[in-house]
Image (spheres, rainbow, N blue to C red):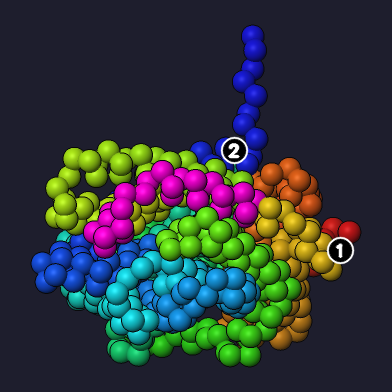
Amino acid sequence: MLRRRPLPPWLSHALRAQRAPVPWPAVVRGALAGGPLLLVAVVAGRPSAGVLLALGAMLAGVNDRPGARLAAVSRLGLPALAGAAGMVAGSALAGGGFAMVAAFVLLGLAGGAFSAVGPVASAAGTQLLVTAAVGAGMPLPETGWQRALLFAGGAGWLIALRLVLPSPARRGTRLGYLYDGERAAVAAVYEAVAALLDATGGPGARGRRAALTTALDQAQDALRGGGAAARRLRAQYTAALPLAEAATALAWAGRPVPGRAGDGPRRLAAAVRTGAAPGPLPAPARADAGLRALDDALLGAAGVFDGGGTGGPPRRRATPAGILRKALGPAGREYGARVGLSFGAGAAVAQALQPVHGYWLPATAVFLVKPDLGPLASRVLCRAAGTVAGAALFAGLAALLPRPFGLVALVALCGALVPVATRHFAAQTAVITVLVLSLVMVGGEPQASWSRITETLLACGIVLIAGHLPWPGAQRGGGVRVRLAVARDAAHAYVRHVLAEEGGGDRAGRWALRREAYRTLAEARAAVDLAAAELPVLARHSDGSARITVVLERLVDATTACAVQVDDTGRVPEQHAERIGVLLAELAA
C-alpha cells in the first residue's frame, strides 16, 4: 500500500488557514465603514473623494482585530497618520519619472526599517508606502493635502465606530462596554491558568503552557487607560501572575493535580467578565510547594477581587531611543533594504509599463515583502492565487451590477468580509482585490482586472528575487538568530535572578523577568516556525533552531519551578540547581 508523501512545509503553509470564530463586531464595522462613505460621496457628486475615504477605511479595517477598544486607537490611528503622510508624499512625487523611483527607494528604506520596531510600526510603514504609491499613481482631482485629509477621515470614521459601537452584550455583565476587550483579555489569562492546571500531568500540558504565555502577552498589551476600571483590571492581571507561576511549576513537575484545582481560576475569570464577586474559591490541597503556591496565589487574588488592590505593573512603553535602535539594528537595516529594493523596482517597472496608473505593482510589492504575513513562498503563492480569483470574480460582477450603486454595495460587502478573510492571505487578497477594483471603477478608471493580474505576477517575481538576495555582511537566518539571542539573554537574566540570594524576595521583579523570558521565547519560536516554512534554500539556514527553543523552554520552566521552591523553603533546592545547570550547559553547547 502506497503511503501519501506529506506536502513540503512551504506548500502546506500556503494551504493552511487560521481557525477562529467570526468577529461579528468587526464585520458590522466593516459594512458601515467604506461603503456608506462612498455612497454619500457619490450622491454628492464627488466619487473621487469617496474613493479616498473608503480607501482609508479599508486599510484601517485590515488592522481592525479583536481586542481592547482603547488600544485600537493607536493600533489603527498611527498607521492611518502614516498613510496620510504617504498620500502627501506620493502626490508630490507624481509624474516624476525615475526621480520618483529613486524617492520610492528611499521611502522604502525608511518605511521598511521602521517596520522592524513592532506590529503597529509595521502597519504604519506599510500604509506609508502603499498610500505613497496610490498618491503618485492614481489620477484623482484632489490635491495632496486633500487626499491626505480624506484618507485620514475614512480611517477616523472606522476608529469612531470601533470606539462607539458596543460589542454584543454578555449575559449577567454589570460593566459598560468601554473596557470589554481588556476584560476579555484578563479573563482569558485566568482561563488559560485553569486549562494548564487541567492538563498538568498529561501530554497537552506543553501546549497549554504556551497558550498561557500568549494570553499573558495579549492582556499585557491590551491594558491601558487611567480610570478606576482600568486600574482594577491591571490589579486583576497582576494577581494572575503568581497563579501562572504556580501552574507552570506544577506542569513542570508533571504530576496530575486535584480536579478542583482549576475551579478557582475559572471563577475568577467569570468575575472579571461580569464584574460580580467570585464567591468562595475552592482551596487546593497544600501537599507540596506547587500546590501551596497555588493556594497562596488564589488567596491573594481573592483579596484583589474583594477590593484590596487597585493598581498593577506599569505598561511597557517604547522610548524614542529604543525605537531608533530597533530601526537601525541589523533586522531593520536588512528589511529596509529589501523593502526599498522591492518598492523601487516595482515603481520602475510600473513606470515603464503603465506610468498613468502605476500604483498597483509597487503597492503589491510592499504587501508581499512583509514577513509577518507568512513565509515568502507562501505569501507569493497566496497573493497570486487571491488576485486571480478576485479579478475574475470582479470581472463577472462588474458586468452584471448597475453602476455606480451596485459597485458601492460591493464595496460595503467586501468591507464586511475583510475581518473574516484575514484568516488566510489568499482569501484576504481576493476580497481586497474586488474592493479596490470596485473603488477605482467608481472613481472613473476603466475595468482593469486582467492587467492587475499581470502586475501582481510581476510584483511576485520582484519580491521573490529581493527576498532571496544575499545581504552583505549578514548571515542567512540572521533574523532567527537575533530572536534566539534575545530569548537566551532574557532566560539567563531570569535564571540569575532566581538563583541569587535575593531571588525569593523581589517577586515583582522576578515576575517581570519571567514574563520577558516567556515573551521573547514565544517570539523566537514564531520566527523559527516561519523560517522552517520557507523554501529549502532559505529554510536550511535555520536548521537546529527549533532544538534551541525547546532547551530554552525547558530552562525557563525549570527556573519557574525553582522559584516556587525558593518561596516555599527560602533556598534553592539542589536538584533544581543541578537541572538548571544541565540545561545551561546544553544551551551553551
Q: Is residue 18 left or right of residue 156?
A: right
Q: Secondary structure at mark 1?
A: helix
Q: Is residue 400 left or right of residue 209?
A: left
Q: Tell me what residue is drawn at x 76 percent, y 78 percent.
A: 496
Q: Main secondary structure of the magenta part?
A: helix
Q: Check disc 2: other Cα within 10 Å, few if <14, some if 14-19, many if 20+.
A: some
Q: Nearer the viewer, residue 492 or 14?
A: 14
Q: Nearer the viewer, residue 340 or 557?
A: 340
Q: Amino acid at mark 2?
A: Leu
Residue 178 rendering spot, x and y as whole percentages: 25, 77
Residue 224 rendering spot, x and y as whole percentages: 39, 83
Number of the front mark, 1 or 2: 2
Q: Amino acid at mark 1?
A: Ala
| Residue 448 is a magenta residue | yes
Residue 114, by quadrant, is bottom right
Q: Check disc 1: other Cα within 10 Å, few if <14, some if 14-19, many if 20+.
A: few
Q: Is residue 123 left or right of residue 59?
A: right
Which range of residues does the magenta coloring cover? Answer: 438-464
N-terminal of the two: label 1 or label 2? 2
Q: Nearer the viewer, residue 321 or 247?
A: 321
Q: Residue tagged by mark 2?
A: 11
Q: Tell me what residue is drawn at x 38 percent, y 66 percent.
A: 138
Q: Residue tagged by mark 1?
A: 588
Q: Nearer the viewer, residue 413 or 196?
A: 413
Hey, which residue is sitting farthest right in the picture? Answer: 589
Q: Secondary structure at mark 2?
A: helix
Asked whether residue 84 appears in the rendered view, the answer is yes
